[in-house]
Image (tube, rainbow, N blue to C red):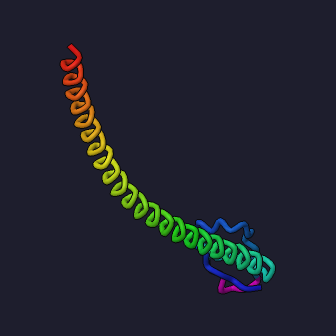
Amino acid sequence: MSEFSWGKEAGVGAEPQPSNHSSTEPGTLALSADDFSALEERVARAVAIVRRERQARAEAQERAGQAEAKAREQAQLVESLQKEVNALRAERDNVRERVDRLLTELNTLEL
């Protein structure tokens, strides 16, 4: 059996086992090879989860950056289109006024 000092907050699920060694210190846990293997597996799974989450976060940040860039482009396009719509409305109003004047002149001719 191997002995590892985990301190008082050792919450890895291993039960302290009595040891026949006279050098056992208080606060020392004895872990069997199976317990240690299980702990290694749990740590490996935790590391894999952290790696996946970091990768997912990096991908999400990349997508967010791309979305922000696209939103800025779209905002510029919207601004451009809004200016064009305003210009077309002004032109329409101008044409309407000219048509009204022409109709007024035609009405005066008929009298």
Tell me what residue is drawn at x 33 percent, y 57 percent: 76
Please say if 51 is above or below 78.
below
**Residue at 25% from the left image edge and 24% from the top image edge:** 103
Prevailing SS of the magenta stretch:
loop
**Residue 83 forms part of the magenta stretch:** no
Residue 29, picture quadrant: bottom right
Q: Position of residue 66 (x, y in %)?
A: 46, 66
* Rendered position, 55 above or below 64: below
* Position of the C terminus by quadrant: top left
Which residue is farthest top? 111
Residue 100 falls in which quadrant of the image?
top left
Depth check: give the residue in front, 58 or 83.
83
**Side of 33 where 63 appears, left or right:** left
Residue 65: x and y in percent read 44, 66
Residue at the limit of the structure toward the right, as seen here: 34
Foreground residue, 89 or 98?
98
Image-based side of 74 in relation to 53, left or right: left
- In this view, 72 is above or below 37: above
**Residue 7 vs residue 34, the one in the foreground:** 34
Magenta stretch bounds: 20-25
Q: Is residue 24 magenta?
A: yes
Q: Residue at x 31, y 51 (%)?
A: 79
Give the residue drawn at x 27%, y 32%: 96
Pick the front one: 104 or 62 = 104
**8 relative to 76 in the view: left or right:** right
User: Which residue is at the far front?
Assistant: 110
Count of numbered circles on the image: 0
- The quarter holding residue 38 reads bottom right
Residue 1, horizontal then vertical, whole percent:
77, 85
